[in-house]
Amino acid sequence: MDIEWAACRPSLFFPLLGEGIRVEGPDGSSVAEFLAQAAGIDPAYLARRVQTVFLNGHPVDDLARTAVRGGDAIALSAALPGLAGAVLRRGSAYAAMRHSITWEGTPGEKGGAGTAAATLKLFNLVARELGPGLLAAGVRVPGEALCGFLERSFPGGAPAGDAVRLDGRPSGAGPWWRGLPPAETHRLRVLPAQETESGAPGAPREAVSPPS
Amino acid sequence: MDKILRIQMGAEGGPKAKVEPLPAAYAGLGGRGLTSAIVAHEVPPSCHPLGEDNKLVIAPGLLSGSAAAMSGRLSVGCKSPLTGGIKEANAGGMPAQMLGRLGFAAVVLEGKPRDDTLYRIYLGKDKVEIRPDNRLRGLGNYAVAETMKAEYGDKVSLISIGPAGEMKMAAASVACTDMEFRPTRHAGRGGVGAVMGSKGVKVIVVDDTGCGVRRPQDPEAFKEANKKFVEGLRKHAVTGQGLPAYGTNVLTNVINEAGAYPTKNFMWGRFANCNKISGETQAETENARGGEGSATHGCHRGCVIRCSGTYYDKDGAYLTKQPEYETVWAFGGNCAIDDLDAIATLDRLCDDFGLDTIETGATVAVAMEAGVAAFGDAQAAIRLVKEIGAGTPLGRILGNGAAVTGRVYGVERVPVVKGQAMPAYDPRGVQGIGVTYATSTMGADHTAGYAVATNILGVGGNVNPLQPEGQVDLSRNLQIATAAIDATGMCLFIAFAIMDQPETFQALVNLINTFHGLKLTADDVTALGKKVLSLEREFNRKAGFTQAMDRLPDFFRKEKLPPHNVVFQVKDEELDRVFNW
Ligand code: SF4
C-alpha cells in the first residue's frame, strides 16, 4: 500500500522511525557506505552527529570497518546522557565497560556485490533531524509495526486537519489502518499539511529544524 | 553560607535550634562532601538508622544561592535504613538556592522527639521556628504544599515527607518543591525520608524573603566564569540539545537497543514495547498535549540545561512532572507496563506518598515475579503503590523495598546491592556499571560513577579503554570524580559538557575559586572526591560492611541475559581492587 499523509504535526511520526524502517543498500559494504546509499545519510553528518551506532544491538566503534549484511538492524543515536550514554558512544574512553556486547564483526568492503535489505532505526535528535527528509521522500514500514504505531498514536483516526491518501484515494475517516495487511511492507510518505494541500511547498504548520 | 543550623528534636521541653559557625573541619565542603563529612564524624556507624543517634543532614551546594548556573541541588545525608551504610541522596527544586541565601551550609536534624508529635520548621531571615502541627499527619506531599501555601504563599520552598516517611519506610524519599511550588523533586534513594520521619519533622519551610543573591569574592571573574560555563553547557549536544528535547528518558530506546534494558524484573535485556514509553514518544506526547513547560523545563531557577518537563493528562490537566528515565523504566519495562499515562500516574503517587520511584518500581516488579500481580498490569501496579500510601500490611512490606519484599515472598531474583535496588541498566550488558553497582558506598546506584572525564581529572593513571580489565580502574575513577562533583552540589548533568570540553571544566573550577576566593586545581577536586569516598568507605566498614557486600546478586553470574546471552564476568578479586588507592 502507498500511503500519503498530509500531517499538521509530522513530528508525531518521528517515534515510528525508532521502531525501524526497511532500507536496501550494497551487501557487505561498510555501515557508512550502506547508510549513504540506502538512506542518503551524509557520512560527514554520521561522523559528527551520530555518536552511538548499533549493529544488531551491539555498539559499533569503527563505522568504516563494520560490514552490513542482509537482515541486519542498524540503529543510530545522537550523544546521550548518563554513564551508559558515555559508555555506548563510538570509540568511547569507557568502551571497556561494555566489552561483553561490543560488535566484533567483519570489516566492510567498498561496494559489496549484491543488495542487502536491512532495518534502520533512528532515535532522538537523529530522528528529529533526518526524519523530515526521509518521511517526505517516503519510508517502507512493516505493516504490523505501522498499524501498532497508528493505533496508539491516533486511536480515533487521523487528527483533524490531516489528509490521508491510500494508493492515491482518500482514506476516509476512522482507523482505516485496521484493514492494512500486517505481513506486508507499506510505503509511507508524510508531508507537512500545507505542502500537499496546495500541491506546492509552503510554510508548514509545524516548524521542522534542519540538521545543524 | 558560614553557619550550620542544628535542631535537637529530643531536647527537654521540646525541639531546640542552635546556629553555630561552620567548623573548620567542614570548611570548603558542600553537598555530598558536607553531608558525608558530618555523618562520618558525628554519627556512630553502629547506630540504628531510625534512632536518636542518627542525624539527617541537609546541605545545599557550594554555590547554591549564588548566580552560578546549575547550582541548586540539595543533598540529604544520614545513615540509611535501607542499606545500613552511609547515604547521600540529592534533589533539584528550590530549597537549596533559598537555604544558600539564608546563609546555611547545612541544617542538621538530631535526636528524636520524646513523643509522636509531628513538627513543622520555618526557616526565614534571622528566624527559626519549630512548631507542633499534627494537622499534617498522614498528608501527601501535594496536600502539605497546599496547606503551607495557604499560610506562607508560594514564594517559599518546602522540604517535606509524605506518609511513607511518617511510616518510616525504607523506600521513603524527601520531597522538594519546584519552581511551581509542586513537591516533584525528590532525594529518593536509601530511605532518607524515613529518617526525617523518625525525627518527627513533616515539613521544613524555607523562606529567603529579604535575602539577596550570594555575592562572589571576585564578581567580575565570577561573571566571566559563569558565562563560559553556560556557553559550554549550551553548545554541547547532550546538555544543549538532547537533554532539553527529551529529558533523561532519551535513554530508553538506546539502552533497549543495546540489550541492557532490564525487563520483567531483570529477566530480559529488551522490552518489546519500549517505543511506547520512549523519550521520543514521551516528548511528542507532551508537545502534542501542550501546556506550560511541557517537554522542556527546569527543576529550579538557574538551570540552563532544563532536562525536565511537565506531564499533562489526556484532558490537559496537570498530572506530574515529566517522569525521568529511571522512573519510566522502573514502572515501565521492569514491570512490563507500556502505558505512559499509567507510568505518569505512578510517578505522581510516588511523589505524593514520598517514595523513591526506583526502589518502588523494582519492588513492584519483584512482587509481580512473586505472583502478587501480573507483569504488564498497570492498574495492579497502581493498586500496589496505593497500598503503600495507605500503610496496609502488604503496603508496609512493599514500602520497605525490593530486598524485604523478595525475602517475604521467597523470590530469588532480587536485583539489589547492599539492600538497595538497582537502577535501569543491566550490569550484564554494561559490565562496568555492574562494577560501580557492586562497589559503590551507596548500594546499587547509577549516579555513583556517572561520567566525568578521567582524562581531564587525571585520576587513577591511564586506562586502556579496549581492555576489559580497564573497567575496574574506570569505575574507581568515575566514582572519585562523581563524588567530587557531588561535593560541589552542582547538578550532575553538567558532567557531559565537562567530560568533552576541558574549557567548561576549567570554567567550573573558576566559578568555585572566584566565588570563594580559592585557588583550587583539578588535582584538588580529585583529592576532594577521594576524601569523600574514603570517609564513606570507612563509615561503612565501621557499620559492619565487608568486601563480601561489594558483590552483585548471584543470578547475574548464572542467568544469561537475552538477547546477547551474557552473564556478569568481573571477578571478585577485580571488584576488590576498586578501592585500592
Ligand atoms: S538539568 Fe535537569 S536535574 Fe539538573 S538542574 Fe536542570 S532540570 Fe534539574
Image (cartoon, rainbow, N blue to C red):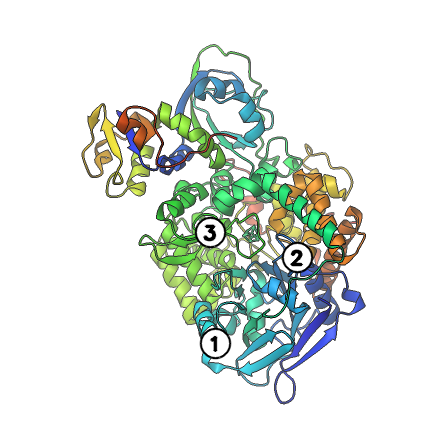
Amino acid residing under circle 2: Gly
Question: In x, y percent, where is residue B396?
Answer: 46, 69
Question: In x, y percent, where is residue B508?
Answer: 70, 48
Question: In x, y percent, where is residue B178?
Answer: 51, 61
Relative height, residue B420 to residue B339 (above, below): below
Amino acid residing under circle 3: Gly
Label 2 – label 1 distance at C-alpha: 30 Å
Q: What residue appears at the point 55 percent right and 30 percent down from the top-left corner?
A: A49
* Residue carrying label 2: B489
Relative height, residue A60 to residue B301 (above, below): above
Q: Are marks 3 and 2 in contact (CB under 8 Å)?
A: no
Mark 2 lies within 8 Å of ligand 1 (Cβ measured): no
* Residue carrying label 1: B151
Left or right of B278 on screen, residue A185: left
**Chain under callout 2:** B
Relative height, residue B50 to residue B546 (above, below): below
* Residue carrying label 3: B309
**Chain under callout 3:** B
Q: What residue appears at the point 52 percent right and 66 percent down from the top-left corner?
A: B172
Amino acid residing under circle 1: Glu
